[in-house]
Image (cartoon, rainbow, N blue to C red):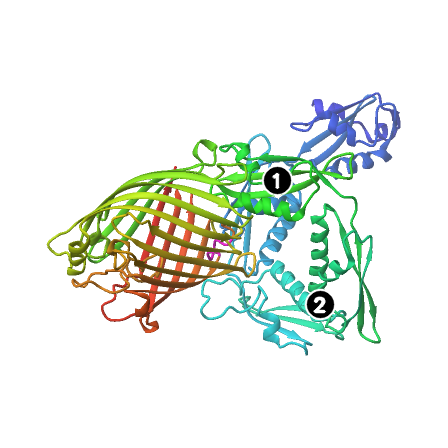
Amino acid sequence: MLFGLLLVSSGLWAQSYVIEDIEIEGLERITAGTTLSYLPVQVGDVFDDARSGEVIRALFQTGFFADVELARRGNVLVVIVQERPAINEIRFSGNRDIPSEGLTEALRGVGLQRGRVFNRTILDQIENELRQQYLARGRYNVQIDIEITELPRNRVDVDITIAEGRVAKIRKVNVVGNEAFENREITRRFESGVPPWWAFLSRRDNYSREKLAGDLERLRSRYLDAGFLNFDVDSTQVTLTPDRRDIYITINIDEGEQFRIGEVDIAGDLVVPVEELRGLVDVQPGEIFSRRRVVDSAERITRRLGVEGFAFANVNPIPEVDEQSREVALTFFVDPGPRVYVRRINITGNTRTQETVYRRELRQMEGAWFNGDQVDRSRTRLQRLPFVETVSLETRRVPGTEDQVDLEIAVRERLSGALSLGAGYSQSQGILLTASLSQDNFMGSGNRVTFAVSTSQVSQLVNLSVLNPHYTIHGATRGFSVFYQKIDAEEANISRFTSNRYGANLTYGIPFSEFDTVNIRPGYQNIEILTVDTTPVEILDFLAEEGDRYNIFSVEASYTHDTRDRTIFAASGRRHRLGAEVSVPGSDLQYYRLTYDGQEFIKLSDTYSLSFSLGLGYGDGYGGTGTLPFFEHFFAGGIRSVRGFADNSLGPPDSNNDPFGGAFRTTASAELFFPMPLAAENEAVRMSAFVDAGQVYESFSDFDADEIRVSTGLALTWLSPVGPLSFSYGVPLRDKPGDDTQSLQFLLGASF
């Protein structure tokens, strides 16, 4: 009845009137002010029937309303609306390939998200957007069902059920128009293609639009690096079989002509001698043009300018192409910009560590001009700290200046304390365990403190060691350790005897350069040898001649050259160590041990690296001691040397046929490191394929290459939240009857 009073006769409505007020009825969530802001009329305007359509269209275009009516009460314009429902929740089910967060973000792009007004007219658009997300991932059989549930207070839930279907597999990638390179040579570096038969976990044959776009860019780079400047991709066809299970990709290309390098010149503001800059250019006249080598040359010049303080230098290679002679003349135009000084170095993220611990590793100083090499070296030195997980470094201009920058260094620290557990298994000894408690960053000082206690079948050990890696401002180190150890050698898979040792030593480290250090360690130990009924005659003869208790005063010296990019999960650089340990005259036994350990890392890509390592050890007696004491023998075998063979099992046996070790040891290894399949983004996990080789001989003169044992296998290291975990599975490639092989080996750790 009341609503009827608001409506007027058609004749009265057709009469124009001046709007004295505007009333909005039917609003629930949308405010009257918001609605009025969309109206094309306002109080004081003349309103007639001709403008009613304009008002209704304006309100419908907002998308807020499902129905709009106009009425008049005197000279008051009454707008009656029915709001569209609001989205209460959007739920996904059945989606595994794309996480719900990704789908939610895609729907946000078409205006569908929680709290927004729901419009049924966009349902087809929603389904199409989701389908496009899956088609881009090669899921052509995806089924999408959308259900709308109405709720009280004019709300709705949107439930989206997805049946993803299987990914269409790439069966062939064919390049048409190539003459300079074979099809296989072009496509072998593609991320899209048919995986080899052995890569059963590979997803290379899963089609993705983004992957294919990346492959086309790789193809373009391949030709540009081979001198084909006019190379072009004419078209790309992705053909789907009728059952939507297989994909065939055809790439049509136009190679164009091959170009060579013409004249090469360097111009601009040459703040570095031009001859030195020419030595950094890796392209010469007459060579085939290569975009990669041109870019690399420009980057080397830029880096060289950065060493001189020109942090924002710009080196632009300008080509002049001669189509007739098919030559490209290059001019490297150098714009060094102003020399830049480092105003301030800010360090963040050091929640557990004193800031001075990080600042003493820096090679770039505040107040000095910017030096790119010193900045990179500073980053590397920080990354090498055992309690640092990642380092990011950003150069920021100081506002209002052109010649000053601030260095922003953000570190992410890892747990620096560790409770380490060593574990092994053999058929004869069962599980063997050792434990140690260490702190690489004691109370945030950067000092290393280790307290080790072991009560395994093999050893009872108590050891306390402290190392200050920056005892002086020049980086000299100093440390000490005291220990007591009782060893049951039989349980360690070597000859049957027991030893009691206690002693102490000091350690001094002297850096001679950024990469070279000499360490000197004087020490003392008291050694007592206890025999059992089954002690072999080799040991009994030695004890009969030398006695069973010894006071040993020794000096150990070592030289280390270390250029690795980091100490944990190194990918490039090298580490070589030469060591010599001598018991000084006056000791009860006089002997020496010489060791060498070297490792080279070659970075193959951002995720792959290769390492080669070699280890040598030799010892002998001198003076009144005729041979190297049996308790100082070298051993090999196990997860730390030759994987696939039991710990300490390689080498000559004693009279009881137990491993006796020897005076000469040689080991070698080649290892390819790569990310773990299905976890390539996890930087805390790394796998490797290895080939190990090694053997122990009674003396150097007994060396026989035919006796070297070789193994191969896979290894995995995980820097887990509770500490490092290492596993290896090794298979002997060269073994002999009687060898103690052991395929699965592991080393466990736990952090606090």
Q: Is residue 263 above or below residue 397?
A: below
Where is mark 2, residue-wise?
290
Where is mark 1, residue-wise?
113
Residue 16 in the image: state x and y as whole percent.
89, 28
Give the residue at the far bottom of this rendering: 179
Residue 453 visible in the shown view: no
Residue 322 in the image: state x and y as whole percent.
84, 71
User: Which span is picked out in magenta?
Assistant: 675-680
**Is 572 one of the magenta-colored residues?**
no
Q: Residue at x 55, y 31 (%)?
A: 152
> Which quadrant is the N terminus positioned in?
top right
Residue kind at label 1, given as amino acid type: Gln
Q: Residue at x 13, y 52 (%)?
A: 532
- Mark 1 to mark 2: distance in Å? 49 Å
**Is 677 one of the magenta-colored residues?**
yes
In the figure, residue 300 lies in which quadrant? bottom right
Residue 246 visible in the shown view: yes
Give the residue at the far left of this rendering: 533
> Dot 1, how many residues are within 10 Å of its Cα: few (below 14), some (14-19), or many (20+)?
many
Label 1, secondary structure: give it.
Answer: loop
Label 2, secondary structure: give it.
Answer: loop
Q: Residue at x 61, y 42 (%)?
A: 363
Q: Is residue 47 above or below residue 432?
A: above
Residue kind at label 2, given as amino acid type: Ser
> Dot 2, how many residues are within 10 Å of its Cα: few (below 14), some (14-19), or many (20+)?
many
* Contact, mark 1 vs mark 2 (Cβ under 8 Å): no
In the figure, residue 237 lies in which quadrant? bottom right
| Horizontal arrangement in the rendering, residue 297 relative to residue 377 (left or right) | right
**Nearest to N terminus: mark 1 or mark 2:** 1
